[in-house]
Image (cartoon, coloured by chain):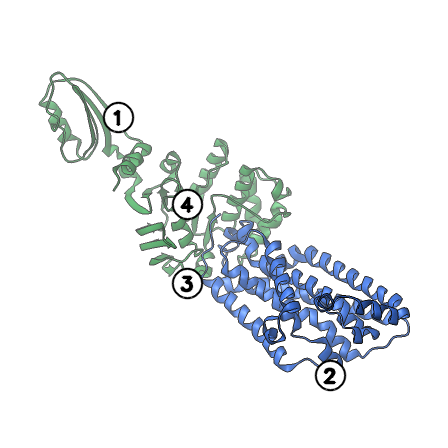
Amino acid sequence: MNVIEIKNLTKYYNKSRGIIDVSFDVKEGEIFGFIGPNGSGKSTTIRTLLGLIHPTNGEAKIFGMDCASNSPKIMKEVGYLPSEVFYYDGMKVIDLLNYSASFYKKDCSKRIEELSKIMDLDLNRKIDELSYGNKKKVGIVQALLHEPKLIILDEPTGGLDPLMQQKFFDLLKEENKKGATIFFSSHVLSEVQRICDKVAIIKEGKIVKLEKMSEINDSNYKRFKIETKDKVEDSYFQIDGVNELKIEENTHSFMFKGDVNDILKKIATIQVNNIWIDELDLEEIFLHYYNKGE
Amino acid sequence: MNIYLHELKSNMKFAFIWIIVLIMLAAIMVLMYTSISQDIDVFKSMLNNFPENLRIVFGISIERIGSILGYYSSFVLTIILVSCSVEAMILGVSILSKETREKTADFLYTKPISRNKIITSKLLASFTLLCISNIIYTLSLFFALSSVSGVSFNLNTFFLIAFIPFIVQLIFFTLGIFVSAIFSKIKAVLPISMGIVFAFYLLSSFADEKLRVLMPFKYFDTNYILNNSKYELSYTILTFAIIAILTILTYAIYNKKDIQSV
């Protein structure tokens, strides 16, 4: 079952681009990574999902309901953590959390206690006095206190120290195990790599790549660097799956995705002095898609 | 209900300060009356020496100044009206827009509640505060006027006049929420509110009577009320039509509005 369905979603702010023709689905129980640099359209997509902004074209659905018209119903089962958390001045943490809980028709007090214990959050402090990281913790508790079926996170780790990040990720994994679907937007690729099952890469408002994390991690992407004894012709490695071919004297380096045997056969027929084969991390894959300009 | 209570709580201080200011203003003016009334002829001739335009701006009517309600409606009411309109306008401009300005919109508008309900809760909270303020103000005024020795006044006329600030506040409150609906981000609530109220006030003071439709401060003409003990029907209808239209437009616009990101 699809929890999120986005079809040809387009949003223009007057004439400036938000997102163009974005389509993807997020299945129930998935941890879905959404990657792109600042200004690429991540937040626009999320804000459309949350019913905060209205799409220019196309549609976004959560739990099979249209996000623009059914937002109040949808939001019962959605927890959202914005990239920057701002709350009402003069309120104590516990007041804010209780206020947040009052919107859901269930008793969340136990959950508030549990979560703030895990996140090491002092409930009796005033929110204006909290540091950025502590405010983020309030945001995390606020997003999870009603045990939502879909958790939407917009750059969630900013301000959290590595230890807290770990706790936060453990918390997310636990929620995921209990059945929650997680939509995780970020520009920090390593954290998406750490937690997500599937990833969509967005660039300048368009989805450039949608792939299962396991496929990406399945060492399908390799970086090759081959130093040959004699000079081989420039187009020798120009086969399917080869990208970013760079040639310096007798050294050919490139990225490869596909059946490794194809490339090994090519290598076997020439005299090789030295060879380096590395796996790509997501960062490089991302940069690769980002530079390709499609 | 939770938003209503939250808004009530967070705007209580604001309303409280304004009501104190208004009561003090009225009290000072009424105290002045006790000294003026002893030398009413001297005072009248002094006012006669004022430039006519100045008298019009301040709504001073020399003929009416002798009676306490006449004094109140020609001398005090103008100041009270402008002040309480500024209050209502500030409340109107800020009540919805503060969520975007203080960046709490992402919190409130992602809760499982429709925008209509959010708007209604906020409007009701503001309405409650304005109601309470006006009840307190009217009671204080009643006791202040009654305490002036040797005067009596028509109760019906008193309540008609005492009710004017509340109705005018409703006009400026709805104008305020409407203004906040059409602009995507309002950074300076106070200058906008004061600017608009004073613009209307100056218009009321200088412009031709033919433009009375554009002068909310003149919808409830105290001369007419003092003479007839009732409001002018046409302007009463106009007032409620304006309030209704601005409110409906606010709902319509806010429902289609994009909540800007922080």
Q: Nearer the viewer, mark 3 or mark 2?
A: 2
Neighbours of disc 4 within 10 Å: few (<14), some (14-19), many (20+): some
| Location of mark 3 (residue) | A69
Viewer-side residue, B25 vs A117? B25
- Disc 4 is placed on an element classified as helix
The Cα atoms of the two marked residues, 1 and 2, are separated by 94 Å
The Cα atoms of the two marked residues, 4 and 1, are separated by 32 Å
Q: Which of marks 3 and 1 is in front?
A: 3
Chain drawn in green: A
Please provide percent x and percent y for residue B241. Answer: 57, 75
Sequence-wise first label, 4 or 1: 4
Q: Which residue is drawn at 70% across and 72% down?
A: B164
The Cα atoms of the two marked residues, 2 and 4, are separated by 73 Å
The Cα atoms of the two marked residues, 3 and 1, are separated by 49 Å
The chain under label 3 reads A
Viewer-side residue, B104 vs A172? B104
